[in-house]
């Protein structure tokens, strides 16, 4: 893919880096972010996410979940289809000759547990988009010490 976006007939709809979550305390009592920040990801081939977490108390941890949309606006979603979908995890079933195989798929989220009291950063990705995802958002929640939510910031970088 050419990085000469100015000459592209289909320019990207984002500017790197994208701040998907301003540094702030996570919701109380382990609730998911009520309104995660959305960003266009039009024509992005890959996504890298960077997280910076400072636990609020001992055993601090957070969950995060990537949501994507194939639609640039909600009105484009077909009747009965959801505008946003969560990433999933797939487990292939056991293959037995002469029988169909039942595999399992489920929505997925990840958990990160802090190793100390200081701010900790990590990167996740690359996640292949191949230009097919129109918008992204990442929701998060305190999952370790829900009585003392930590502080979380999320940045996205797309190419």
Image (cartoon, rainbow, N blue to C red):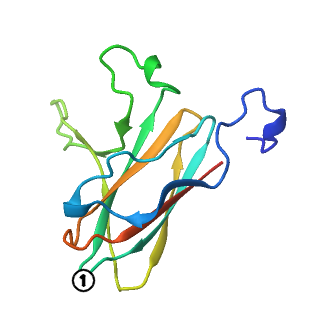
Q: Is residue 10 left or right of residue 50?
A: right
Q: Does residue 31 appear in this view? A: yes
Q: Is residue 39 left or right of residue 17?
A: left
Closer to the camera in the image, 55 or 43: 55
Closer to the camera in the image, 95 or 33: 33
Q: x%, y% of residue 102?
A: 18, 35
Residue 59: which quarter of the image? bottom left
Closer to the camera in the image, 27 or 97: 27
Q: Is residue 158 left or right of residue 73?
A: right
Please determine whether, in this image, residue 70 is positioned above or below residue 147: above
Residue bearing mark 1: 58
Which residue is painted at 41% across and 50% down in the image?
A: 138
Residue 63: which quarter of the image? bottom left
Q: Is residue 152 left or right of residue 134?
A: left
Numbered disc 1: secondary structure: loop
Q: x%, y% of residue 87?
A: 36, 43
Give the quadrant of the N terminus: top right
Q: x%, y% of residue 8?
A: 79, 32
Q: x%, y% of residue 153?
A: 46, 64
Neighbour tally class for label 1: few under 14, some 14-19, many 20 plus, Cα within 10 Å: few
């Amino acid at each position: 893919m050419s990085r000469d976006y100015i000459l592209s007939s289909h320019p990207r709809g984002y500017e790197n880096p994208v701040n998907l979550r301003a540094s702030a305390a996570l919701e109380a009592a382990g609730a998911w972010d009520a309104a995660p920040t959305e960003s266009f990801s039009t024509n992005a081939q890959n996504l890298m996410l960077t997280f910076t977490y400072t636990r609020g108390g001992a055993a601090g941890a957070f969950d995060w979940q990537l949501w994507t949309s194939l639609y640039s606006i909600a009105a484009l979603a077909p009747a009965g289809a959801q505008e946003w979908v969560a990433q999933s995890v797939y487990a292939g079933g056991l293959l037995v000759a002469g029988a169909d195989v039942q595999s399992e798929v489920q929505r997925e989220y990840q958990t990160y547990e802090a190793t100390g009291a200081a701010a900790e950063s990590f990167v996740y990705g690359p996640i292949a988009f191949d230009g097919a995802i129109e918008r992204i958002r990442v929701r998060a929640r305190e999952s370790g010490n829900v009585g003392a939510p930590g502080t979380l910031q999320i940045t996205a970088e797309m190419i």
